[in-house]
Image (cartoon, helix red, strand yellow):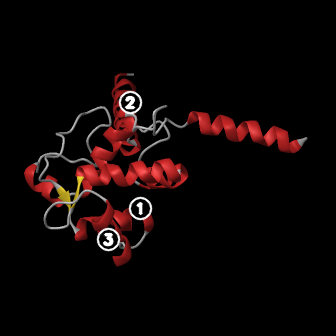
Amino acid sequence: MSTSVGAPAVEEHEKEKAALLDEEGDLTPKFEAALIRIFARFSSSYKEAHPDVQASGSGSSASIPRPEATDVLTEADLDAFSTATNGAALPQESKDEIREFLDIDKDGNLTLRGFIEMYHLQSDNDPEETWKDLSKLGFSSSLEYEDERKQATETKAAGDSATDQVADSKN
């Protein structure tokens, strides 16, 4: 009987997560927006083209410029991304598979299209691995960028504290 009590809780937890793929198996718009933000965060060419945009610090609702076709993830960018998600640089074998099976530029760098293809495949085959990555990169189960929500909460708390101090000084 305790088994059946635990099972619905797991299902409820699963229902809380935003969909990664729609009924046709395509990426949902929220998931694609999260992937664009992640790509922009790690792409050195994107950061060079958009020095004022901080993809890891911009609000989840704030749109960031979409990466251009020339924006890519270099080997060093992939290593930084892999270290953030898996704690270590990407093995050479994985880099070779990326070059063989995903969309790359003429220099062998992963394009945004290739990055989205990579996550489409992973999310279709192992959504929990995708959720682990998203969580490590600061996204909530609703695909909101949590670091930004944390900053907004801290800013509001600081503002409330200042308001309280002003009110106390008037009393």
N-term mark: 2 or 1: 1
Query: In the picture provided, is 161 more to the left or to the right than 44?
Result: right
Look at the numbered discs 2 and 1 and tell me whether their residues touch, using CB distance below 8 Å: no
Residue type for callout 3 = Lys
What's the distance in space between the residues labelled 3 and 2, CA to CA? 49 Å
Tell me which residue sits at (24%, 47%) in the image. Answer: 55
Q: Which residue is mark 1?
A: 85
State the residue at coordinates (16%, 39%).
Answer: 65
User: Residue at position x 34%, y 32% from top?
Assistant: 159
Q: Quadrant of residue 82?
A: bottom left
Q: Position of residue 90 (x, y in %)?
A: 36, 72
Most distant residue in the left direction: 49
Left or right for 161, reference 104 = right
Residue nearest the observer in this picture, 141 or 167:
141
Categorize mark 3 by other alpha carbons within 10 Å: few (<14), some (14-19), many (20+): some
Residue situated in front as seen by the camera: 4 or 168: 4
Residue under label 2: 160
Q: Are marks 3 and 2 in contact (CB under 8 Å)?
A: no
Residue 91 in sight? no
Q: Is residue 79 above or below residue 72?
A: below
List the residue tagged with mark 3: 95
Between disc 2 and disc 1, the foreground one is 1
Q: In front: mark 3 or mark 2?
A: 3
SS under mark 1? helix
